[in-house]
Image (cartoon, rainbow, N blue to C red):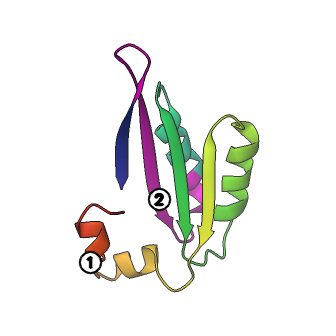
Amino acid sequence: MMDTQFHRIGDNKHVISVRIIIPTKDVGPYIYACLSSCIDGASTNATIYIIDGGSTDTTLSEVARFKHDYPDHSVVVSHDACQGAGQNRQGNRFRLTSSARQGEM
């Protein structure tokens, strides 16, 4: 999921702010490459949110390695053992709350 916001700075200059949300669960072999592709060649201000669904592999250590290797990029980790990628893989649909549907997110 990606959310883009535009901020006006000075005389007709805009800075794009991007929020990328990545649900994870046991994706250690892939998460570093995923994070790298999120920032690869980006000229935007991106914040990456990792919502971890209780990984038992190297997912979180790979995220920590990425944060160490790229300290100028904002990566926020949240632990959500009851939700996340596991439910998505079982075919459950992502449900927006009523406030999110109304643009209050």
Q: Is residue 25 left or right of residue 11?
A: right
Type of the residue with mark 2: Ile
Q: Nearer the viewer, residue 20 or 103?
A: 103
When the figure is inspected, residue 59 is found, relative to residue 34, above or below; the finding is below
State yes or no: discs 1 and 2 in contact (Cβ < 8 Å).
no
For the point 30% across and 77% down, the residue is 97
In the rendered image, residue 63, in percent from the top left (x then y), is placed at: 66, 54
Give the mark nearer the N terminus: 1 vs 2. 2
Q: Is residue 90 left or right of residue 74?
A: left
User: Is residue 20 in the magenta section?
Assistant: yes
Q: Which residue is mark 2?
A: 22
Type of the residue with mark 1: Arg
Distance of mark 1 from mark 2, alpha carbons? 15 Å
Q: Is residue 71 left or right of residue 86?
A: right
- Residue 30 showing in the rendered view: no
Q: Nearer the viewer, residue 77 or 60?
A: 77
Q: Residues within 10 Å of mark 1 (few under 14, many from 20)?
A: few
Question: Helix, strand, or loop for circle 1?
Answer: loop
Q: Count the labels in the image.
A: 2
Residue 62, located in which quarter of the rendered image?
A: bottom right
The quarter of the image holding the N terminus is bottom left
Q: Which residues are magenta?
A: 8-31
